[in-house]
Image: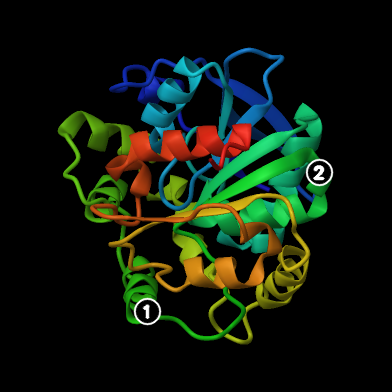
Amino acid sequence: MDVLRTPDERFAVLSDWLFVPRYQEVRATDGTALRFHYVDEGPRAAAPILLLHGNPSWSYLHRKMIRDLLALGHRVLALDLMGLGRSDKPVDRADYTLASHIGWVSDWLEALALEDVTLYCQDWGGLIGLNAVSRQADRFRAIVASNTGVPVGEGSNPFIEQWLEFSQKVPYLEVSGLVDMGAHRALGDAEKRAYDAPFPDRSYQAGALEFPLLIPVQPENPGVPMCRELWKFLEQWSKPFITVFGELDMVSPKSQQAFIKRVPGAKDVPHWLLSGAAHFIQEDRPADLVRIIDRAQRGDWL
């Protein structure tokens, strides 16, 4: 497996990003060592909060949430999915599958031996993260799902169709522009540079370009059987399952109600549909997300 690693100097001076980079190797099925980048800040004795982003962003999306959760005394981890952010980037798009992403994140969880975790997951961080939870459920105490879903081949909405067509035709994904369009508020120039930092050129974008094709919206998509099994797991999940979606999100507008209806742990806990929040809800309403995640970690529903 050929692998690229974004040069460190691309991340040297980023707006509002002062966190120490940490790394953990996992192994691909062919034995290749792949390096995850993650943030791990706060007291070691505290129960961890894990933040998982989606495509084509990275943990920079969580910068304000990390800062504010740390101020509340939490231990906070934020992982860059493989192929994105500061994590390694296999060159061959065929190396990226839903199964490989789930396996890599699951191996990372085992390597860090995390326990009593509260998971916050958005976009692909949800589809990958929830599958990882299904493999290691005892490690988790609560889930906060945000602008994500678990499709099982039911077909796509018009926005997803447009995203699939666009993403496979462009010569280079202008990530900063995509995040800017997917947030309700306008990003500043320094923030845009941070979102573009992981990708010096198209050769680094194999993972970001392949992600749209992995969305299991077609009946024949290889991710569909895994997602059907995930729903069987979620329909038995009785620990807290909180949802917080953006009112302006066009990616997974029906998923919140599906979670609330089908997941036992979604009963007797609060759910939110935040106004003025689009797909990249972390850019639009970070303070609200911090408040909700803090409550989820403490189990405070009063």
Q: Is residue 165 above or below residue 300?
A: below
Residue 192 seen from this side:
yes
Of the two numbered discs 1 and 2 on the same chain, state the one appearing first in sequence: 2
Say if 194 sits above or below 159 in the image.
above
Query: Closer to the camera, 3 or 36?
Result: 36
Count of numbered circles in the view? 2
Q: Is residue 275 above or below residue 109?
A: below
Percent position (x, y) of residue 293?
Answer: 51, 37
Q: Which residue corresponds to mark 1?
A: 161
- Measuring 51% from the left and 52% from the top, which residue is drawn there? 270
Who is closer to the viewer here, 166 or 123?
123
Quadrant hosting residue 18: top left
Residue 197, position in %: x, y? 35, 34
Residue topped by disc 2 = 31
Looking at the rendered structure, the secondary structure element under dot 2 is loop
Question: Which residue type does callout 1 highlight?
Answer: Glu
